[in-house]
Image (spheres, rainbow, N blue to C red):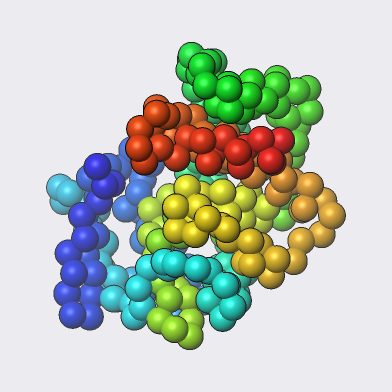
Amino acid sequence: MSTHELRLGPSAVTKAYRWTDRDQPLREWRGLRLLHRYAPGLAPEPLSAEFDVIPPTVTMSRLPGSPVTGSVTGPLAGALAAAITRLHDAVPAPELAALPPRAGAPEGLLTHVRTWHAETPPPDADLLARAYAAGGDWLARPGTERDILRPGRPVFGTGDGNVHNFLWDGATVRVVDLEYCGRSDRPYEIAEVVEHISAWDNDPRGLTEVLARLPLDPAETERLTQCRRLFALYWFLRVLPEAGSPDSRAEATARRLLALL
């Protein structure tokens, strides 16, 4: 079930929130206001918010473009990389420091994946069993927690790496869906986007060209690798129940996890 309902008008969109357990309406409103102030045009303009009604709502401008689909290469890859970079760099350091961490921050995700892996019975199929075992070995490695919890360069994060949250109008990429946004770090945010199942469902090559256009220093590159492993293992566990079905994504996700490990 979607976390929200969208009410589309000709020039505005009202988002009604089914879940508020992570302060989704407030996070979205705060994120929209920050981006409107510091990166105008990158995200919808915030118009109004009603937090005390059921369901709470946020109304914002309606952006041009359609969700990113198909091959992410050439001008689209460049525009998506530019949008991600602008998003990350938009909020000044003092305001960024005052933000709460994004929902699904590294410590919480690592704890969740460890628990999930421990509670998931090992699969029988060879490829899936090898991916499951390799993921467990990585989780148990002494340096994994240190690597995941080591802070990277602080950035504004959307909290949701779904590639369909980026809208493409043929010239510019813009971003929507900020209900989990907050303070994050650049490698963690990039890892979530490039390992999100939506990117691989959309294009079997993933976001390879986008990643190549996102400059990272050596420390960020190392952290990116560790964070990609965490997100890849998350998605492997999430789609593992699909194994054996005609449309299963478990095998492809297992191959990606093994390649990263």
Task: Answer above or below: position of 218 versus 209.
Answer: above
Residue extending furthest toward the bottom = 171
Q: Position of residue 43 (x, y in %)?
A: 42, 72
Asked whether, in this view, residue 161 is left or right of residue 187, the answer is left
The quarter in which the N terminus is drawn is top left
Identify the residue shown where x is 37% and y is 68%. Answer: 67
Q: Position of residue 40 (x, y in %)?
A: 47, 80
Q: Is residue 158 visible?
A: no
Q: Nearer the viewer, residue 224 or 23?
A: 224
The quarter in which the C terminus is drawn is top right
Q: Is residue 188 visible?
A: yes
Task: Answer above or below: position of 14 versus 130.
Answer: below
Identify the residue shown where x is 77% and y is 53%. Answer: 220
Asked whether, in this view, residue 52 is left or right of residue 169, the answer is left
Q: How many discs appear? A: 0
Q: Position of residue 182 (x, y in %)?
A: 51, 53
Residue extending furthest toward the right = 218
Write down the quadrant of residue 218 in the picture: bottom right
Identify the residue shown where x is 78% and y is 22%. Answer: 142
Task: Answer above or below: position of 219 versus 117.
Answer: below
Q: Nearer the viewer, residue 227 or 235?
A: 235
Identify the residue shown where x is 34% and y is 80%. Answer: 64
